[in-house]
Image (spheres, grey):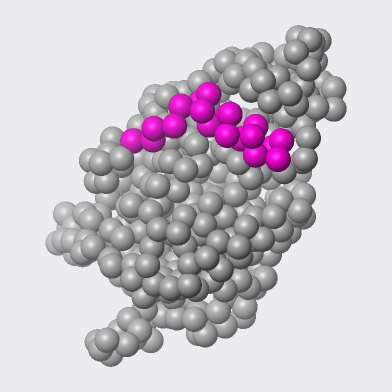
Amino acid sequence: MNEQGERGKYLELKDKKILITGAAGFIGYHLVSVLLQKEKSIHIIGIDNINDYYDISIKEYRLKKINEISLEYFDCSWSFLKGDISDKQFVCAVFKKYKPDIVINLAAQAGVRYSIINPDVYIESNLIGFYNILEACRNSCIDNDSVKTNEYQGVQHLIYASSSSVYGENKKVPYSTEDKVDNPVSLYAATKKTNELMAHVYSKIYNIPSTGLRFFSVYGPAGRPDMAYFKFTDQLRKGEKIQIFNYGNCKRDFTYISDAVECILRVISCPPMQTAGEDGLRAAPYAIYNIGSQKPEKLLDFMEILQKELVDAEILPKDYDFEALKEYVPMQQGDTHVTYADTTTLERDFGFRPKTNLREGVHKFVEWYKDFYKL
């Protein structure tokens, strides 16, 4: 499935209704915040189930910040609905009431390791939930297909979060969207690969322009506490042992949150265009992009930067014994040795390369962490 649609007609966002699922999540929060501040006269509908996979106080903090921003930008509107995309009746009701022009699906059960111990929630959220979104998009287009007026025309672009985990243990690096991704090493990765297949089918059959974004280790302020950099910070504060997998030989293509959001902003207005396929039939208006820094970093190097920033911020004392807390362990099931994004198509189509270096990004996270926990 290497089919990559050409970019279609530019979508003007003014007066558009944008539905964002997972709005209280890490990427969702930053995306909504930037959209409200940068775009004119848009209407954002946010959905999130506020589950307790991690500390819900962080999700409540994100929503509070969004509400504060929305009060400053009067020409835009922000509505939040607590609900689960695995609830088909709920999803249908949202689409019927709000009639979104653009849908950005960021809702998903995240976490590679958690998928090993609690697979049910991944099926419910990542598969059934995404199916419900696709069906609602399809019905919005079918209901309006015969009426070509200035009224609601159905969903004009579906953007959804995929993951670098779909590459599994691919040996070829950097990872290209042209590579085969048939060997996932976790259920989480398998659900994300399935999302891409499902989106392709709905794009092909129902002509729904869809763009999948394979995110590579997104990090930054107000991030997820289950991510390595956040967990390490918590453990160091508590004086707990830190497990460093693969004996410190892992490499990750870390992507700072503002770079990830900038990529989404550029993608939103440029849905893929339906074209003629090689078989003479129409090709799906469908595209996939890697969202990464194209610069994998050793986990140990990342740790060194994090330690320095925590000391500089006076979260940890200068004489802190980091070495005593490091525990080098084998690779954990479901993990991969390296992630490394080839962002050639992203640069070609949108002229963008992430620009935040690791030290700058970690510094901003540490500043937020200190403020959030009032240290």
Q: Residue at x 69, y 55 (%)?
A: 61
Q: Does residue 121 sit above or below 297 in this rendering?
A: below
Q: Find residue 265 and report its horizontal and vertical position in percent.
A: 38, 54
9 left or right of 125 in image: left
Quarter-of-image position of residue 39 = bottom left
At a point 77% along the width and 41% down the height, the residue shown is 373
Residue 175 in sight here = no
- In reply to whether residue 222 is colored magenta, the answer given is no
x, y percent for residue 66: 59, 61
Residue 273 is situated, as x and y percent measured from the top left of the image, at 23, 61
Q: Residue 6, can we see it?
A: yes
Q: Quadrant of the C terminus?
A: top right
Against 264, residue 370 (above or below) is above
Depth check: 245 or 271 in front? 271
Q: Position of 9 compared to 15: left or right?
A: left
Q: Nearer the viewer, residue 312 or 105?
A: 312
Whether 319 is drawn above or below 28: the answer is: above
Label count reads 0
The stretch of residues the image draws in magenta is 353-371
Front-most of residues 84 and 128: 84
